[in-house]
């Protein structure tokens, strides 16, 4: 390990020296060397972080460096994050630097930065910290909308957003930032199977907050999810099961209002029942569909009772307000009282 530490200190020293004299060429070369070392030798990653590499790499994401240098810096941070997440998260400004990289025009740096965020979110304790950085979350959502971004950047952004949404208090923030519309746009228009699967997985998590109900309504989200749950509606079984999970989370978070919205979609209950009884579905998917089906049936029963009560109240109101209106039970009495007796 002493050899690794010596190597790390040497590499970081070169970067520190080049940055000190503002030699952009030497800085870029040092960053590229750090990227190669962190990729080829997993055992040098933690020593690199311990030797102070992270602040210098992060500075390359916010300084007017070349696109190649920014890409190398973001990739090196991603490699280091696999083994030294705590050192990254304890570096002041690291999340702001990653957000800046995702907002930049450089595609490769953006997807490495998004992947680094996803890596950090593997630690449960970091999810509320990352979720408190609205500019970073906004940058992730923007990556979903970028038509010029490639598959890698989109998938990395989706993985990061999934990690963010695993912390319940982050979900409302994602809704506020327009994540629901961006996610459903991918589901409806992106033909890449892996993208749709990952997008529906994030949708399922975001659905688990009360604020999502209105956002889903704004993009016909419930209708889209029901269509995916229907046999043949989704390209893969995973997307179908994710859609069922999303509807279940929506109902659990939104209560009777959410149940009513799902039931308002024709064939929703039958589609969910078919998934629950589908022998080809995974045990998890069938369990989610079964729970959703029971919730919809219970909700339908509540709606039925409410309608019956409202109708009964309506009839009682008529009886009280109209002296000529009589209930069937009192009709005989009125009829008998109005008969004319013949002599």
Image (cartoon, helix red, strand yellow):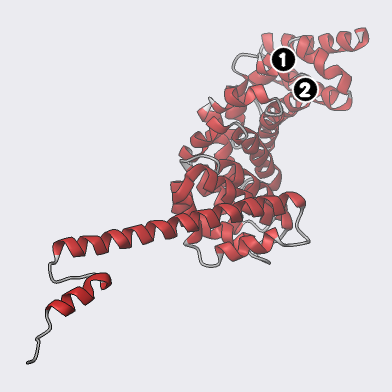
Number of marks drawn: 2
Q: In which quarter of the image is the C terminus?
A: bottom left
Taking the spot 60% from the left edge, 41% from the top edge, the residue there is: 205
Viewer-side residue, 35 vs 68: 35
| Residue 219 seen in the current view | no
- Residue at x-position 89% and y-position 23%: 41
Picture quadrant of residue 224: bottom right
Can you give x and y, in whole percent of width and height, for residue 206 in the image? Answer: 56, 41
Residue 313 relative to residue 235: left or right: left
On the question of residue 152 being in view, the answer is yes
Mark 2 or mark 1, whichever is nearer to me? 1
In the rendered image, the vertical position of residue 45 relative to residue 247, given as above or below: above
User: Which residue is painted at 17% across and 61% down in the image?
Assistant: 320
Q: Which mark is residue 80?
A: 2
Could you tell me if the residues under marks 2 and 1 are in contact, i.e. CB atoms within 8 Å? yes
First in sequence: mark 2 or mark 1? 2
As rendered, which of 131 and 59 lies closer to the eye? 131
201 sits to left or right of 48:
left
Q: Where is residue 285 in the image (x, y as percent from the top left)?
A: 71, 52
313 with respect to 256 (left or right)? left
Structural crowding at the residue carrying mark 1, measured as other residues with C-alpha within 10 Å and reported as few (<14), some (14–19) or many (≥20): some
Q: Which of 268 and 218 lies nearest the eye of the viewer?
A: 268
Against 162, residue 260 (above or below) is: below
> Mark 1: which secondary structure?
helix
| Residue pointed to by mark 1 | 87
């Amino acid at each position: 390990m002493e050899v690794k530490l010596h190597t790390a200190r040497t590499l970081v020293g070169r970067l520190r020296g080049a940055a000190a004299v503002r030699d952009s060429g030497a800085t870029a070369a040092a960053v590229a060397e750090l990227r190669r070392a962190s990729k080829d030798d997993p055992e040098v990653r933690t020593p690199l972080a311990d030797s102070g590499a992270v602040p210098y790499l992060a500075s390359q994401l916010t300084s007017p460096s070349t696109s190649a240098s920014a890409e190398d810096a973001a990739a090196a941070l991603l490699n280091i994050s696999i083994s030294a997440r705590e050192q990254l998260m304890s570096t002041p400004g690291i999340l702001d630097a990653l957000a800046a990289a995702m907002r930049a025009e450089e595609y490769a740096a953006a997807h490495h930065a998004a992947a680094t965020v996803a890596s950090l979110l593997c630690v449960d304790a970091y999810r509320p910290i990352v979720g408190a950085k609205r500019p970073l979350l906004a940058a992730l959502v923007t990556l979903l909308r970028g038509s010029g971004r490639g598959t890698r950047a989109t998938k990395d952004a989706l993985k990061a957003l999934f990690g963010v949404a695993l912390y319940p208090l982050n979900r409302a923030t994602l809704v506020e930032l327009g994540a629901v519309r961006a996610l459903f746009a991918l589901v409806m228009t992106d033909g890449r199977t892996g993208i749709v699967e990952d997008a529906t997985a994030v949708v399922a998590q975001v659905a688990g907050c009360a604020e999502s109900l209105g956002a889903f309504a704004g993009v016909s989200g419930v209708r889209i999810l029901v269509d995916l749950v229907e046999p043949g509606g989704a390209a893969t079984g995973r997307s179908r099961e994710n859609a069922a999970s999303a509807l279940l989370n929506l109902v659990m978070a939104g209560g009777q209002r959410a149940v009513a919205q799902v039931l308002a979609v024709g064939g929703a209950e039958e589609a969910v029942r078919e998934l629950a009884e589908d022998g080809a579905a995974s045990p998890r998917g069938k369990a989610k569909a079964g729970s959703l089906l029971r919730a919809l049936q219970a909700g339908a029963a509540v709606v039925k009772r409410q309608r019956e009560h409202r109708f009964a109240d309506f009839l009682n109101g008529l009886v009280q307000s109209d002296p000529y209106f009589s209930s069937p039970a009192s009709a005989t009495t009125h009829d008998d009282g109005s008969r004319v007796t013949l002599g």
